Image: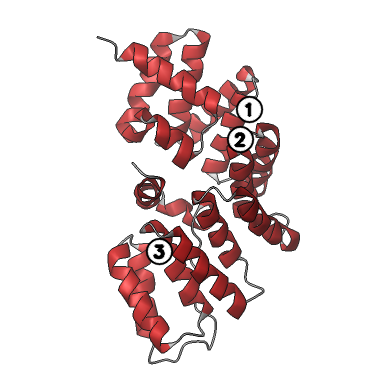
Amino acid sequence: MSVLQGLKNWLPRWSGLLLVALLLVMDPVTGAATPALQPLFEQALEASREGDFQAALPLWDEFLELAPEQPAAWSNRGNVRLILGDPEGAIVDQTRAMELAPAELDPHLNRGIAEEVLHHWQQAANDYNWVLERDAVNASALYNLGNVLGSQGDWLQAEALYRKASDVSPDFAMASCSKALAVYQLGEFDLAEKELRALIRRYPMFADPRAALSGLLWHYGSFGEAESHWNAAVGLDNRYRQRDWLLEIRRWPPQPTADLMDFLALLEAP
């Protein structure tokens, strides 16, 4: 499975996290679209939010032919192009949105995500830092910059960024779990276990901490409890079986990923 296909699969399941973790949807700038075009904008936006990206793309194309100076449309089309497998096109669209609305934060966040897909780590970091220079407690920029640093192996700094993102946005479950995973990677196993168990109590239907705790418990040698949490996790989301998905899409650190994969190899051995 490609990175882009994985991202496409990820988004519908986690639509509630989009505004803080992944692709941010820009609303139309006041007065930028004529009343006659507003229904077309809303139709394109609704298709995007519903995850019907194949339908959304031609709607955004049509809108931009009629209103090429509308930055929100460029940014939203860029999001759709990214999910449909065109990160280069997404970067072009987000850059055009920046030119038209230079003070807007969302196009920088969205362009950073496209740059991450291409492993353009420095460019992505530049976009997230641009946001943080203007909004030091922007949870999305903190979280995404943590992903960039983690992908480059700097889990100490990644953990600090995840922690700050979860502090400024306490309901940002993905940031809290990424923080626990970074702690796990750094060898602070007792603290990681405490944080993962707290997340499971708070979000019992969230597969991520259950899958992570399965790997950690196996690391401790607690096979029975690891199996119990794994059965719950895989019942919620079976993608946690996939090493590449964990590393490339979910952005787990290598140690938790290796522990979970070793546990699954033993669990599923004939």
Marks 3 and 2, how far apart in space?
30 Å
The residue nearer to you, when weighing 85 against 27, is: 85
Whether residue 23 sits left or right of residue 164 in the image: it is left
Q: Which mark is residue 179?
A: 2
Task: Provide the residue designation for mark 3.
Answer: 81
Marks 2 and 1, how far apart in space?
6 Å
For the residues labelled 2 and 1, say whether their Cβ atoms are less than 8 Å apart.
Answer: yes
The residue nearer to you, when weighing 40 against 266, is: 266
> Is residue 89 shown above or below 124?
below
Whether residue 266 sits left or right of residue 127 in the image: it is left
Q: Secondary structure at mark 2?
A: helix
The residue drawn where x is 42% and y is 91% is 35
For the residues labelled 1 and 3, say whether their Cβ atoms are less than 8 Å apart.
Answer: no
The amino acid type of the residue labelled 3 equals Arg
Instruction: Pick the quarter of the image with the N terminus.
Output: top left
Residue 208 in sight: yes
Q: Position of residue 52 (x, y in %)?
A: 30, 63
Whether residue 54 sits left or right of residue 185 in the image: it is left
Residue 138 in sight: no
